[in-house]
Amino acid sequence: MRLRDVVIGANASIFYRLDFSKIKDVFYPHTEEEAEQAIRFARERSLRITVKGGGSGLSGACTGGNDERIVISTLWLNKILRIDPQGGYIDVQPGLTPDLINEALKPYGMKFYVAPSSRDVATVGGILSTDGGGNDTWVNGTMRDNTLRVRMILYDGRKITVTREGVESEDEELAEELNRLRVTLDDVASSHGTLGFVTELRLQIRPLSEESVVGGVAHFDDATQLGQAIHRMIEARSPIKYGEAIVAAHPDVREDLRPPLITLQFPGDYADDLREILDIELLPDEQVDRMKDIRIKLPKRNPKQGIQLALFEGYGLHGRSLLNMQATVDAINELLESHRYTPFAKYGHAPSKWYLGDNTAAYGMVMHSREIRPEHTTREEVLNTILDIVDLCEKLGVTPKPEHKWPFSDTVKLNRLREIRRVVGGGFNDFLLRDDYREVLRSMV
Ligand SMILES: Cc1cc2nc3c(=O)[nH]c(=O)nc-3n(C[C@H](O)[C@H](O)[C@H](O)COP(=O)(O)OP(=O)(O)OC[C@H]3O[C@@H](n4cnc5c(N)ncnc54)[C@H](O)[C@@H]3O)c2cc1C
């Protein structure tokens, strides 16, 4: 295997101009002891550490920036340690994917309910580090909601166990200090590998359910009407099992679609209540499946001229940005157009749930956006546009979300991680928490 393949992996992000000479070694531990040896190797040489799961993260975090570092892959940390259906949990090593975990749970009639669309490659260690989730977070929550505890090794070799309540460690002073800071699993979630190496996870599992649902489509005059309907569903805690909105689609791929629209599936006896919120047209199952298929294929199609790209793979609209969705979309489009991008398709999960940097839950729509790329753009120009959108999102009250792939854009989270690292030490993915992160990212595109 080439070094380049290990470091870039399945990473679909734009960060691939790396200085490979700065990667001093790559480790593939099978056990916690071997992981400890790798960490000691780095510490003795004052090298930084990047832990690599499936490499499907989009933030650039899993590349390790351009620090002198070692890479520790969790490829062989892929064992199931214990399944306890009665206790409702499974203990696993961090390199397993949700698909493999669910394969093992099938005979027990149980399921691990975290389903990013990358669930065949993304590892549970990586998914917790990005607090990922699929299009069902409204029903099943994000990774943090489905994790009960983790074991971690810190850069200095000390070990901690983090639960929803706090921290335990053989080093009582360390545990006391971290508990004084009220460190919990919320802090490990979305920490982008900056706190330590997660070597074991206890994940919540639940019985498989095959609840029957009906489905339909609702159309809206504009995106604001759609956003307000999503807001009302959230307030009413509507039992939506599947919700995907299409906010806009370029004429080249629009066909007979009339966006803004939302396709929903829900228990049959909820239809009358839902009609009080929006004008749902119930459809036969085949037509609901067709709508789902159109939505899935939308980002895979190209315009008649040029190519489309995911410049900014998803952001969360909640609160005022949801209630005023048309103005939000217009402001983002205006910025895109000023950088010569043509908006191509906007669609996404709704209602949806994610977490803000202060660990409060946000509810709204996770919008994915595709643009037609202008000709002759450099990679640096692409990154500059992305960073401008991140800044605009902050102003609009939008979470520049993608699995919180921009830890540095949320100052609350950033400061919290820095505060915890004053106790646990640095060493892991330091580049993400530096003031000059934008320059680091620029050096990587
Ligand atoms: C096609 C595609 C579709 C996607 N769809 C979704 C989606 O639907 N929902 C979603 O949330 N995300 C999605 N993503 C993003 C990506 O899959 C997630 O960010 C995923 O959670 C990353 O997991 P990974 O194992 O690939 O981690 P990596 O990319 O390898 O690493 C991500 C971060 O976690 C850290 N890390 C990894 N393992 C450990 C560990 N054991 N201990 C400490 N730190 C660790 C890394 O250092 C890095 O900072 C998608 C990505 C792609 C390419």
Image: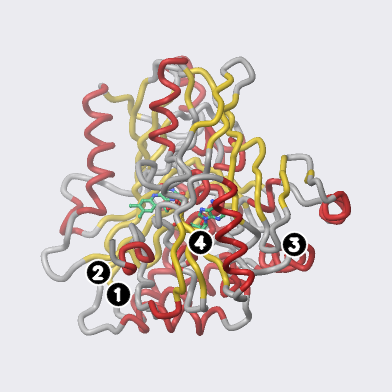
Q: CA distance from mark 2 to mark 4?
A: 22 Å
Vertical comparison of 299 with 77: above or below: below
Residue 303 is drawn in which quadrant?
Answer: bottom left
Q: Is residue 405 left or right of residue 380?
A: right
Q: Left or right: 445 with respect to 37?
A: left
- Which of the two discs, 1 and 3, labels the residue nearer the N terminus? 1
Residue named by callout 4: 405
Name the residue carrying label 2. 372
Q: Secondary structure at mark 4?
A: loop
Residue positioned 22% across, 47% down in the render:
297
Query: Can the viewer see residue 395?
Result: no
Label 1 vs label 3: CA separation? Answer: 43 Å
Does mark 4 have its CB less than 8 Å from ligand 1? Answer: yes
The quadrant in which residue 213 appears is top left
Q: Which mark is residue 341?
A: 1
| Number of the label disc, if any, that sits on residue 424 | 3
Mark 2 against mark 4, which lies toward the viewer?
Answer: 4
- Mark 1 Cα within 10 Å, few/some/many (few <14, many 20+)? many
